[in-house]
Amino acid sequence: MKTCPVMTTTAGAPIADNQNSITAGPRGPVLMQDYQLLEKLAHQNRERIPERVVHANGSAAYGTFTVTQDISRYSVASVFAQVGKQTDVLLRFSTVAGERGAADAERDVRGFALKFYTDQGNWDLVGNNTPVFFVRDPLKFPDFIRTQKRHPSTNLRSPTAMWDFWSLSPESLHQVTILFSDRGLPQGYRFMNGYGSHTYSLINAAGERHWVKFHFKSMQGIRTWTNSEGNAVIARDRESAQRDLYDAIEKRDFPRWRVCVQVMTEEQAKHTSYNPFDLTKVWPHAEFPLVDVGVLELNRNPRHYFAEVEQASFSPSNVVPGIGFSPDKMLQARIFAYADAHRHRIGTHYESLPVNAPRCPVNHYHADGAMLASIPERGDAYYEPNSFGGPVQASQYREPPLLIEGDADRYDHRQGNDDHSQAGALYRLMNAAERERLASNISEAMQGVPVEIQQRQIALFARADPEYGHAVARKLGLAD
Ligand code: NDP
């Protein structure tokens, strides 16, 4: 027979009885001295941490990134050091709007958040399954998210709020088109692409910077549900994407993605008709072809959801030597907001938790603060500079300067921006059946929205392509 360990309190004292509370007589009240009962109740009260404001509902798996092509001409990042090199990763997928426990098979953007445990620190690429986003200025982000969440009075999701905001924010047109296209409802996390979405820098040994976008192409192929198929899935399985990912990995049917980059020189960036740092735009493949870099494979399920997925913390602020930021306004804001969210929802030392801890030496002076779990063995070297052998800076990791010109001002980010051409290009890639489903999905989502808002949005679709505007108007009974 299996020998079980003795159950203890959190302080390690053996527990003699885990079935019966201490009461004054068999019918009497419980006693305050029943510290096992108190500890159990108190712990249960603390079993939740604040869920993520966005991307609350998610699934994750561990895996490896393997370099297949040499890109050292662009980057000195150790993760790309040589063909065949492998780096451990954690990839968390999510939906954006739903709370923790929301159904997986809902039409929504999917998060695609990667942590590469590189030998020069963690590199987090916190992307989505779409190459663009709804807004380009971070000042609009909290407003946008409010429209995706619940109405303050009714506590219901509000299509009026969503379409009001989108129709007043033409920069959202491209992402709205993707969201309501077939790809807005993937069959599962294995069947969608991932995108780093922002523009980043790659920096090579000569200190030269190239701008880059990261793409992850599903090797399982793209598979999507229609709205009615999605509803049927939800009726029988609210955790369809979690189940699909978990089961595939348990069956050793490991999902894989081709990892590619698009590369733009600093000189080219000065001449594009669109702002290459605008998160609502893609870089056309014809001008900036995909360059293969490697393969990402997921091959291990987490053992404990709370420890390894709920506490997993990704932040675009985590870059490593050879990979840097760009002037993308949204990226700049996320560099602050993501790490700030984790300090709030997990705690000061969130990066020392096993799932977040780098797999390389970590040497800093940020010791004090809630939940310091290990003793910093630095003796007298607890500030910097010091004379006692504490960690010091290393100038070889200095980045080339990011040249930014211009007077500080609040520039109108919509002024002169072409928000419709790329949405129109996507529309024209779709075949007739795909266009038909796009228009149906939009009109379904617009039911009950005031006609004035519907018309304002239709005008935006029509700017992308007159046929697009007309198709949606027809579905809504606003055109013949
Ligand atoms: P291409 O024809 O070279 O590429 C089209 C891209 O669109 C492919 O990456 C394809 O993905 C993807 N795609 C197809 N259907 C959808 C959809 N419903 N939702 C999202 N992506 C889809 O064209 P361009 O590079 O010139 O871009 C044209 C348009 O394609 C863009 O305006 C943009 O809307 C969209 N797109 C472009 C991307 C880019 O980085 N250039 C990336 C994704 C979309 P796949 O190869 O996996 O089939």
Image (cartoon, rainbow, N blue to C red):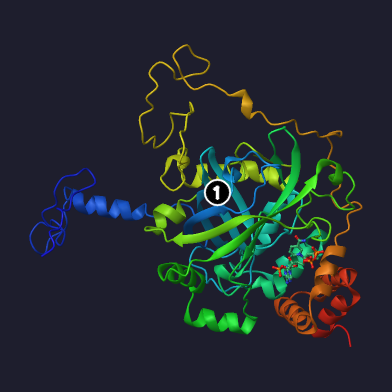
Q: Quadrant of the C terminus?
A: bottom right
Residue 463: x %, y % from top left: 90, 69
Determine whether the residue tagged by mark 1 lies in a helix, strand or loop: loop
Residue 436: x %, y % from top left: 77, 83
Q: Residue at x 59, y 45 (%)?
A: 82
Residue type at mark 1: give it.
Phe
Q: Residue at x 84, y 68 (%)?
A: 425
Query: In terms of depth relative to the viewer, which is nearer, 202 or 157?
Result: 202
Residue 280: x %, y % from top left: 77, 57
Q: Residues within 10 Å of mark 1 (few under 14, many from 20)?
A: many
Question: In the figure, 348 relative to 102: above or below?
Answer: above
Horizontally, residue 59 falls left or right of residue 371, namely right
Q: Residue at x 49, y 47 (%)?
A: 345
Ligand 1 lies in which image quarter?
Answer: bottom right
Question: Which residue is disc 1 drawn over?
Answer: 314
Horizontally, residue 36 falls left or right of residue 139, namely left
- Find residue 284 and report its image quarter: bottom right
Q: Which residue lies most toward the left here?
A: 25
